[in-house]
Image (tube, helix red, strand yellow):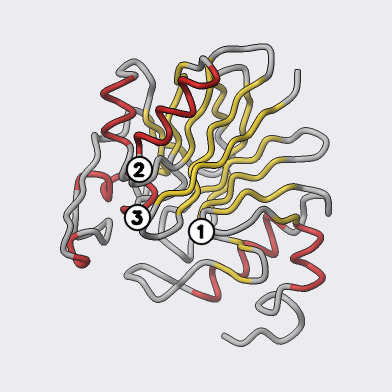
Amino acid sequence: MRLQVETIVSVPFDENTYVVWLDDRDDALVIDPGLEPELILECLARHGLTVAAILDTHGHADHIGGNEAMKRAFPEAPLVIGEIDAPMLTDAWANLSAMFGQPITSPPADRVVNEGDIVEYAGIRLEVLHIPGHSPGHVVFVHRATPAHVFGGDVLFRGSIGRYDFPGGDGPLLLSGIREKLFTLPDDAIVYPGHGPVTTTGQEKRSNPYLRGTNPL
């Protein structure tokens, strides 16, 4: 059984949604449904997939904008998010959409998770890591295979890190979480970020300017 990952990029924030499934199954995870849910639905239809669960790494609008459409299409699929960020789903000011003049809300969470929890849907087992700093309740979902797959939201990017100037942001906390929780994974762990191209933990250890030696925070 091989893990399949397809990326859907939504405008206007170039946010990455991930459709994840095992190649011998016809159900999938949708991680961080973005603001163009029709593209996600097209991907699912193209591969003949249904949705077993909707996972949100955090509660910012660009990562939850497609939740309602996913729940409408697949009402039995549980919506899962970190416990601390769960209130952001239904509050347009908390999820930052109101400040951009386009209020967005999502259905409430069906399940909330915390550090060390395990989620298992569509035959895929994921460990939850709580890595705050971009948002207070940001979680990362780790599939501990060989190599590991990290669905990291807005924590670690290729050559960068998530913003920490939003309400509830904390740069030093974000950096410590990356070092203590992501950089302890094998160097070949594949990181699927919320924006931009895929990277690995090893590449970011070696070259990320925010995480080498004295950081610029």
Looking at the picture, how far across and down is residue 41, in whole percent? 40, 28
At mark 1, the secondary structure is loop
Q: Residues within 10 Å of mark 1 (few under 14, many from 20)?
A: many
For the residues carrying marks 1 and 2, which lies nearer the camera in this image? 2
Residue 154: assigned label: 1
Q: Is residue 33 above or below residue 14?
A: above
Q: Is residue 52 above or below residue 11?
A: above
Amino acid type of the residue that numbered disc 1 sits on in the rendered structure: Asp
**In which quadrant is the N terminus drawn?**
top right
Looking at the picture, how far across and down is residue 157, in whole percent? 61, 63
The residue at 27%/45% (across/down) is 89
Q: Is residue 75 left or right of residue 46?
A: left
To which residue does mark 3 refer?
Answer: 60
Amino acid type of the residue that numbered disc 2 sits on in the rendered structure: Glu
Looking at the picture, how far across and down is residue 116, in whole percent? 59, 39
Do callouts 2 and 3 mark residues in contact (Cβ within 8 Å)? no
Q: Earlier in the sequence, mark 2 or mark 3?
A: 2
To which residue does mark 2 refer?
Answer: 36
